[in-house]
Amino acid sequence: MNNKNDFASKCPVDRAMDLLNKKWHIQIIKDLFFGKKHFKEFKEDKPNLSNKVLSNCLKDLENKELINKTILENGNYTEYSLTEKGLALNKVIYELAMFTLEKCDDFKDDKHKANVEKLFKNTLDIN
Amino acid sequence: MNNKNDFASKCPVDRAMDLLNKKWHIQIIKDLFFGKKHFKEFKEDKPNLSNKVLSNCLKDLENKELINKTILENGNYTEYSLTEKGLALNKVIYELAMFTLEKCDDFKDDKHKANVEKLFKNTLDIN
DNA sequence: CGGGATCCGGATGGATACTG
DNA sequence: CAGTATCCATCCGGATCCCG
């Protein structure tokens, strides 16, 4: 892999996007970073997300080893969490947020950029 | 925007993904970072990408102000380039590549990680 | 060469109702 | 609460042909 052609033929960027390039995947991963754990919680702020789609989405993320599913003893209480691989997406998510804060007009005049940045650094444990 | 709820309701991560969450968008942006400029070049390594889809894709990226379209004098020769906003995606792309190189098994044993990293740092001018 | 027009089938998304 | 089952609309993407 010494030149751009070799690189393009087996591209790590494309590989990463294969994991994420679905409508809801990043949003769910982001929710997990911010403490959400349950099926119902993921739906709270997503009126267009139906049960079927969310269900498929969670299965797909599990197959891709980005999240874990844990069924608690009491039966009908399921928790989702990020795997180590999923947690490694923190920098990607951080850079996505920073891109918007720096380059999208309706966010640029947002005085709270510093707050958001801090929130992210804490939550995602960036350094 | 002082807490996570405010943040979630107007999320910069989601905003950034609105720009990228299409099957071919990141791949085309990546191509541009690596020097490709022409309609035909984008198709070279993407046998499944039809004219219609690529055409729509380029229009969409143009509307989102991530790329510029330049029609050269000679008439039928069109060039595409990244806008300043598009160029600002370099860190996102870099982190996507690093994620794969660190966490995807079939890339982990790749001895060329250092090379790729260097290639990216040069190409994307990261710092 | 860049890219529009058309056609088409399969995948995807969403609403709703139901279940353990 | 965490899903499954159905149904239906739409959209997406791919193939092919065409044009300036």
Image (spheres, coloured by chain):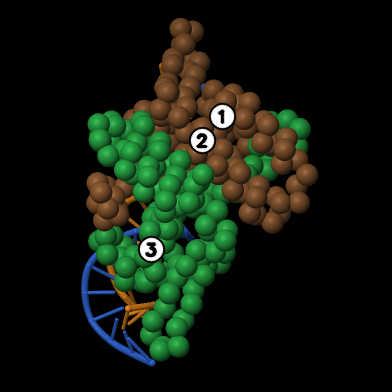
Chain colours: A green, B brown, C blue, D orange
Disc number for residue A98: none
Are both tags, 1 and 2, on one chain?
yes
Disc number for residue A35: 3
Q: Nearer the viewer, residue B93 or D5?
A: B93
Give the image location of residue B110, x and y in percent: 75, 47
Give the image location of residue B19, x and y in percent: 38, 40
Q: Nearer the viewer, mark 3 or mark 2?
A: 3
> Residue drawn at (49%, 73%), measured in percent from left and top?
A69
> How many residues crowd mark 2 within 10 Å: few (<14), some (14–19), many (20+)?
many
Tell me if label 3 and label 2 are in contact, CB under 8 Å: no
* Distance in Å between CA atoms under marks 3 and 2: 25 Å
> Residue drawn at (45%, 83%), measured in percent from left and top?
A72
Disc number for residue B126: 1
**What amino acid is at disc 3?**
Gly
Q: Is residue A122 above or below residue A44?
A: above
> As drawn, is B92 to the left or to the right of B11?
right
> Residue drawn at (45%, 70%), measured in percent from left and top?
A80
Q: Quadrant of residue B22?
A: top left
> As drawn, is D9 to the left or to the right of B88?
left
Q: Chain of mark 3?
A: A
Q: Is residue A124 above or below residue B19?
A: below
Q: Chain of mark 2?
A: B
**What amino acid is at disc 1?**
Ile
**What amino acid is at disc 2?**
Lys
Disc number for residue B91: 2
